[in-house]
Amino acid sequence: MPVCQPVSLCGPGSSARPATSSRSRSGGPEDWRGDAACSGLPDRAVFARRREAALPALRACAVCRVRQRCLEAVAPYDNWFDGVSGGRLWRNGKEVAGPDGLAP
């Protein structure tokens, strides 16, 4: 399990992001986090529970080249994740519908 620090994505309910390991810095499989379009965004956007607050992260996801890797690594549907992963907003591990309760 990763050590959490404000750097990249982390597990369920966390307000922090996992630190990059030494393996990541040397080109290992965790490298994708440095390429994430959301890497410079504040935690309040990435871990937002409401669509309006999450818009900066959702917009970043639209152009992110590691979106699928993010979704696989975070696996929001397998835990109680709150925030943005893979271009979608999640609350308690379930994809959040649009602002009116409709599909996004």
Image (cartoon, rainbow, N blue to C red):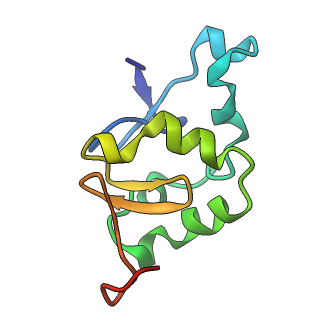
- 36, above or below 11, in the image: below
**Quick one: 49 or 66, which is closer to the camera?**
66
Residue 39 in view: no
Percent position (x, y) of residue 53?
43, 72
Q: Position of residue 104 (x, y in %)?
A: 47, 79
Q: Is residue 65 left or right of residue 90?
A: right
Residue at (42, 59) in percent of width and height: 44
Q: Position of residue 73 (x, y in %)?
A: 50, 34
Q: Is residue 40 left or right of residue 85?
A: right
Residue 103 against residue 71 in the figure, above or below: below
Instruction: Name the residue at 61% across, 45% down.
Output: 68
Residue 43 in view, yes or no? yes
Number of numbered markers: 0
Residue placed farthest to the bottom in the image? 100
In the picture shown, does residue 35 fall above or below 28? Answer: below
Would you say 71 lies left or right of 2 here?
A: right
- Residue located 68% across and 65% down the image: 62
Q: Is residue 12 above or below residue 57?
A: above
Q: Residue at x 63, y 69 (%)?
A: 59
Residue 28, picture quadrant: top right
For the N terminus, the image quarter is top left
Residue 39 position in % (x across, y down) = 62, 45
